[in-house]
Image (cartoon, grey):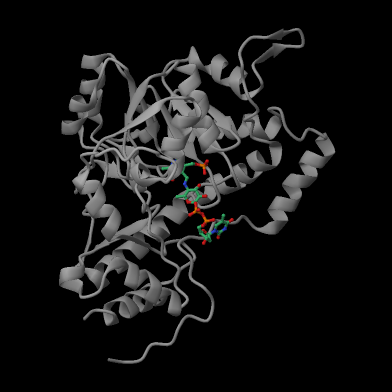
Amino acid sequence: MTEIKPFKEPIYITRPILPPIKEVTKKIEEIWDSKRLTNVGAQHRSLESGLLKYLNTPYLTLFCNGTLALNIAFQALELKGEVITTPFTFPATATSLIQKNITPVYCDIKLDDFNIKPENIEKLITPETTAIMPVHVFGNPCEIEKINEIANKNDLKIIYDAAHCFGVKYKNKGIGNFGDVSMFSFHATKIFHTLEGGALTYNNGELKETFFLLKNFGIKNEEFVLLPGTNAKMNEIQAAIGLLNLPRVDEEIEKRKFLTKIYKENLCDINGITYLDEKKHIRYNYQYFPILINEEDFGINRDQIYDNLKKYNIFSRKYFYPLCTDYKFYKEDKDWNIPNARKISNQILCLPLYGELKKPEIDKICQILINFKN
Ligand code: T4K
């Protein structure tokens, strides 16, 4: 076995795309000159129309982050009682429900895409259920038709957590076209970002005004406050960064697609390591590159690999461990029927993936990983 030296600089799970600083300065000067810093100014309006085109959805509303966008979607759709969701996700999916006094009910996931398992949803529906909130985890589209059918049959709303999905298409349609509402995150760790930020996309134009009111304290005009809203507005600097990043997204996706291919070529024959196959009719965005480690076949487990990679200056992530069902703030230990989610959460490891990385770096990460094999 050849000895491999650690990377000189840390290799993180992701790095944001960054427009040239000169372009940023120019935009900031524009904002400074206008003295309009927030409350839906020119940058905000321009980004909204740019994103409508890019995401190809009938309606879109911007927010200061994805989590508050979710909160507002629940409020606007008047969700209450229970919402069926996945335990294999980032905390914000579940905690945004809890913040609105809605009980998350956890459904198991599928092994071929790590998304909610439609076959198990119906068993979890009770008279209290008002919606289904699936997550297109890692940018992999859920089983949209099946979920639609269940929701229609049971008169439930669908809110997709599409935080990872910027640029994803399903059957040639932007992923934000499905369900009642979809939420995109524009956090710095996402393919497209506005530093912090998010958006809701939807087909029902009547929601537009409600979303607008709810993100701006519920204020209709100087004399009327119509709804108990909050402050969830995207500011002008966030929107300006979005405008500079938007033309760079497709190139970033192409770079990540290439790097994903390199990962797969390196890891395809390694006993104990598997990754998801791509499905038909999907334009992926390569937001993450998750692999599964089977300890029995690989010789060491996911946690050992995670720790060992750090010694080489490689910072992988255990997205998503722990499962939402295992958060400490749940006082009662409910016995959720989620064997697949448990298995995936214990084996998953997301490897560094961002456009700035080069083939030799991916080859080296893989070689280091393969050398851990017992
Ligand atoms: N639903 C789902 C399914 C989500 O995944 C998320 C967020 C949400 C909802 C909520 O959306 P937002 O409210 O955030 O819009 C990160 C992000 O903070 C979070 O947005 C994201 N999901 C989650 C999957 O990843 P952490 O705790 O892993 O981030 P952090 O700070 O450890 O960053 C990871 C790595 O990225 C760093 O090691 C280095 C790099 N990085 C990070 C930042 C913030 C940079 O290079 N530059 C940066 O500015 O949560």
Image spot of residue 327 (x, y percent): 40, 45
Image spot of residue 100 (x, y percent): 49, 25
Image spot of residue 160 (x, y percent): 37, 31
Would you say 202 lies left or right of 298 here?
right
> Which of the pair 329/208 is nearer the observer?
329
Image spot of residue 69 (x, y percent): 52, 31
- Residue depicted at 49% across the width and 49% down the height: 190
Would you say 324 lies left or right of 205 here?
left
- Residue depicted at 62% across the width and 32% down the height: 46
Work out which quarter of the rendered image holds the N terminus and state it: bottom left
Depicted 235 relative to depicted 5: above or below: above
Depicted 140 relative to depicted 160: above or below: below
Work out which quarter of the rendered image holds the C terminus and state it: bottom left
Count of marks, rendered view: 0
- Residue depicted at 35% across the width and 48% down the height: 138
Residue 271 in view: no
Residue 266 in view: yes
> Which of the pair 242/230 is nearer the observer?
230
Q: Quadrant of residue 304?
A: bottom left
Q: Residue furthest top?
A: 223
Depicted 36 relative to depicted 27: above or below: above
Q: Quadrant of residue 353?
A: bottom left
- Residue depicted at 76% across the width and 35% down the height: 37
> Which of the pair 186/47 is nearer the observer?
186
Q: Residue furthest bottom?
A: 2
Would you say 283 lies left or right of 94 here?
left
